[in-house]
Image (cartoon, rainbow, N blue to C red):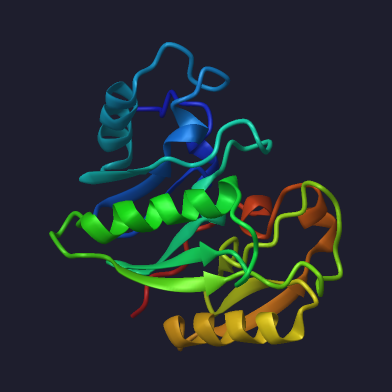
Amino acid sequence: MALDLVGAHVGACAFGEDEGTLLITESSIVNANRNPGKTRDQIEDELIETLGVEKVVWLAGVRGEDITDAHVDSLVRFTAPGVVLLDQAFPGTPPDSWSRSADQARSVLSKATDARGRRFEIIDLPQPDLDRITGEGDDFVSTYANFYIANDAVFMPRFGDTKADQRAKSILQEHFPKRDIVPVRIDTIASGGGGIHCSTHDQPGKPAA
């Protein structure tokens, strides 16, 4: 069965792990600009039937402030079943719709369980200091959560705030100890509202022996 939803095919508005749990932002898919006339329940049923997941955890997201309506891959990512990295604004940054979205996601995840009944372990992944990054633009996306997992490496954004870049690399290395963590400068992509994961399509790797 084909997935008859706009937005879900890109692997960005919905993100899962291999034990049946899917995270998704409501703003990006229960939205008249992508799936007019479809309710959240209808969309959830279609995701479960087509993707084979057992549980969908809905996060609010942010509507109308970027081209994606807040894809989940810039907000929260699995590192293992039951373990997630959650984007966090740089300490001291004034609250905005994005930090409130992260707060809402934390509230939901802290009370939710995954498909196996486990409580989520939530690890903060702080953003860089916007006064120290090398990129610019009103649409600039400064989240480290939009990383890409390859067979033997994780490609992460490098924004130019040396301390924050290193902190993010250390967090990723802790959670992906068998992969090289490769920082990549992405100012051009980020200035257009995108990231590394946004620009890729995952390909299945050869199963471990």
Count of numbered circles in the view = 0
Across and down, in percent, residue 172 comes to: 52, 80
> Is residue 45 shown left or right of residue 10?
left
- Which residue is most to the top? 37
* Residue 182 occupies quadrant: bottom right
Q: Is residue 128 above or below residue 116?
A: below
In what quadrant of the picture does the C terminus appear?
Answer: bottom left
Across and down, in percent, residue 39 comes to: 34, 19
In what quadrant of the picture does the N terminus appear?
Answer: top left
**Pick the front one: 10 or 164:** 164
Q: Is residue 63 above or below residue 91?
A: above
Across and down, in percent, residue 126 comes to: 57, 72
> Is residue 80 shown left or right of residue 139?
left
Q: Is residue 192 above or below residue 47?
A: below
Residue in the picture at 58% in, 20% down: 33
Residue in the picture at 85% in, 63% down: 135
Across and down, in percent, residue 196 comes to: 67, 60
* Residue 118 occupies quadrant: bottom left
- Which residue is most to the left? 117
Q: Is residue 81 visible?
A: no
Residue in the picture at 82% in, 53% down: 191
Residue in the picture at 46% in, 72% down: 124
**Pick the front one: 149 or 15:** 15
> Is residue 114 shown left or right of residue 27?
left
Q: Is residue 14 above or below residue 116?
A: above
